Image: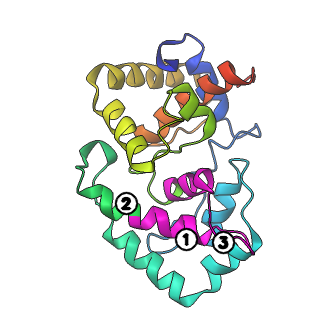
């Protein structure tokens, strides 16, 4: 796993360097944060992860009163604890919010929405402690790309976050990043789940696409 790779701290440091085009310093940290809505700031933050949000979806999130009301209600119904503390019962509320976001992201003229990557990144922007940033690279890296089920993926990430050895390795990576960050340019996300996402993604990009990240 990327947690044990000697280059992981450098990759994470680069990802959060605000002097680069990497999204780490902006995706979770872009202000303001509205806990009751998906805002223009949220949509802008999501686009930093190389995501194209359909224009109709933007209007839905920002102008559709009924959808805005539903988003507020489903956000409020989410479990108040982090992913590693969830039970199977918590997944019901998570699925309602996730599925509402996914349906809202459907392009004009589409009868169904399969924008699971955009949905994952949008929900992770709203609750980075609860929803992992799932994408093709990370899912392939973890060998869960064939599960085809958001809840099954959540279980995998939950168990990773519960594993004491993995959390210890993650803490070690963070400590090394802080040691390397002598100029204090990079500001890491506070949520461990988000940091795990970044470690996995940078490792996956290296393995799958030969990226320098």
Give the magenta part as a residue range. Answer: 96-124
- Residues under numbered marks 3 and 1 in contact, where contact means CB atoms less than 8 Å apart: no
Tag count in the figure? 3
How many angstroms separate mark 3 from mark 2 (CA)? 23 Å
Residue 185 visible in the snapshot: no
Q: Is residue 28 left or right of residue 183?
A: left
Tell me: residue 5, above or below residue 124.
above
Q: Mark 3, residues whose alpha carbon is within 10 Å: few (<14), some, or many (≥20)? A: few
Q: Residue furthest bottom?
A: 65
Numbered badge on residue 94: 2
**Residue 27 image point, x, y percent:** 61, 50
Nearer to us: label 3 or label 2: 3
> Any mark on residue 38, and which?
1
Mark 2 vs mark 1, foreground winner is 2
Q: Position of residue 184 (x, y in %)?
A: 59, 32
In this picture, is 33 found above or below 172? below
Horizontal side, residue 172 vs residue 49: left or right: left
Label 3 vs label 1: CA separation? 23 Å
């Amino acid at each position: 796993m990327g947690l044990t790779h000697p280059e992981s701290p450098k990759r994470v440091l680069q990802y959060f360097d605000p002097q680069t085009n990497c999204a780490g310093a902006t995706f979770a940290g872009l202000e303001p944060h509205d806990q009751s809505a998906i805002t223009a700031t949220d949509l802008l933050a999501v686009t930093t992860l190389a995501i194209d949000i359909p224009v109709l979806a933007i209007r839905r999130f920002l102008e559709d009163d009924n959808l805005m009301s539903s988003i507020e209600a489903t956000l409020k119904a989410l479990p108040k604890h982090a992913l590693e503390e969830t039970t199977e019962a918590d997944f019901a509320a998570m699925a309602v919010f996730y599925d509402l976001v996914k349906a809202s992201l459907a392009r004009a003229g589409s009868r169904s929405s399969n924008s699971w990557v955009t949905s994952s990144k949008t929900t992770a922007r709203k609750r980075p402690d609860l929803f992992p940033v799932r994408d093709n690279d990370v899912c392939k890296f973890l060998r869960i790309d064939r599960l085809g089920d958001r809840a099954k993926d959540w279980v995998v990430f939950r168990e990773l976050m519960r594993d004491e050895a993995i959390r210890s390795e993650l803490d070690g990576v963070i400590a090394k990043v802080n040691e390397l960050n002598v100029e204090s340019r990079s500001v890491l996300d506070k949520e461990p789940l988000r940091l795990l996402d970044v470690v996995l993604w940078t490792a996956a990009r290296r393995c799958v696409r030969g990226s320098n990240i």
